Amino acid sequence: MSKAIIVVDFAYKGPKRMGRGTGRQGLKATLKYLQFRDKRNNHLAKSRDYERWQDRGMGVSHGEIYRNCDALQSKHVLAWTWVISPAPDLMELVQQDERRDLLYELTERVVEDYYTERGFDVPEYSYVAHTAKTKGKNGTPPQEHMHTHVVLPGTVPSTAERLPVYNNATKGHDRLFREIASQHFADMLDERGIDWRPLREEPQADVQRNDEIDLDDFFSL
């Protein structure tokens, strides 16, 4: 296959401020943004009744998640922040009322499998779903772009003491992340009987462009 079926990304916040958007203040600002932003031009009301975060041990509000990140940090990582972004054209093949549940299940499968493959216990985490619109190109209309932002601590539980976790591209961790996410998304589409593979077939003349991905379409927050 050529074009990616899903794009995933690692980022982290260190405990020390190194400039705008970094350190503890940077994490606080990021968590507030993730909690209160939904669709472009639609800032969510700060309602206590709105279940924004999916809590898997880190909390249901930006303040609670921040406190847990602070308590569970490693020496160099205050929090990991992931993006899990299935391709919009493939998500459109899923029935509208099933998309959010699929995205939630996909996110949890990816988190749990990634840590298990690394030989770690699964840590606490929370995640939030966002919806945006892709940029329409060549006369095509914009597509709905659903994705999740996952917040995880810098450490994982173990029998003795919590262990630090680092994600290093030179050790193949980013490749493992992509492979796990791609496999789970493909499996979930197949489980639903969705014929998605023809959308990833390209003419032979385009083989040289196999690695070209428009990241703007995947990371429109």
Image (cartoon, helix red, strand yellow):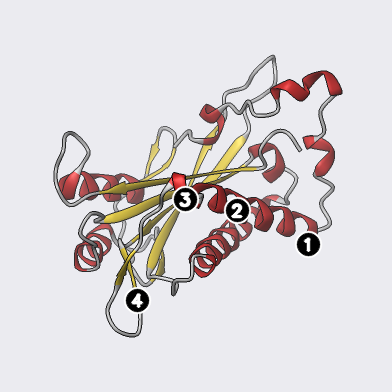
Dot 1 or dot 2: first in sequence order is: 2
User: Residue 149 location, x and y as percent?
Assistant: 43, 50
Mark 1 crowd level (few <14, some 14–19, many ≥20, 10 Å Cα):
few
Residue beneath disc 1: 191
Mark 2 nearby-residue class (10 Å; few <14, some 14–19, many ≥20): many
Residues at marks 3 and 1, CA–CA distance in whole angstroms? 32 Å
Closer to the chain start, of discs 4 and 1, is: 4
Q: Which quadrant holds residue 63?
A: bottom left
Disc 3: which residue: 171
Q: Nearer the viewer, mark 3 or mark 1?
A: 3
Query: On the rendered image, what quadrant is the N terminus found in?
Result: top right
Secondary structure under the numbered disc 1 in the rendered image: helix
Q: Nearer the viewer, mark 4 or mark 3?
A: 3
Q: Is residue 208 left or right of residue 197?
A: left
Task: Give the alpha-carbon distance from disc 3 to disc 2, as whole Å.
Answer: 18 Å
Q: Reading the chain from its start, which is encountered first: label 4 or label 3?
A: 4
Q: Position of residue 215 (x, y in %)?
A: 53, 30
Q: Position of residue 117 (x, y in %)?
A: 54, 66
Q: Amino acid at mark 2?
A: Ala
Amino acid type, mark 4: Pro
Separation of residues labelled 1 and 2 (CA atoms):
15 Å
Query: CB under 8 Å between callouts 1 and 2?
Result: no
User: Image height check: is 143 above or below 73?
Assistant: above
Residue name at image x 31 percent, y 62 percent? 153
Check residue 181 in the rendering and tell me which mark sits there, or answer none: 2
The kind of residue tagged 3 is: Lys
Q: CA distance from mark 4 to mark 1?
A: 32 Å
Q: Nearer the viewer, mark 1 or mark 2?
A: 2
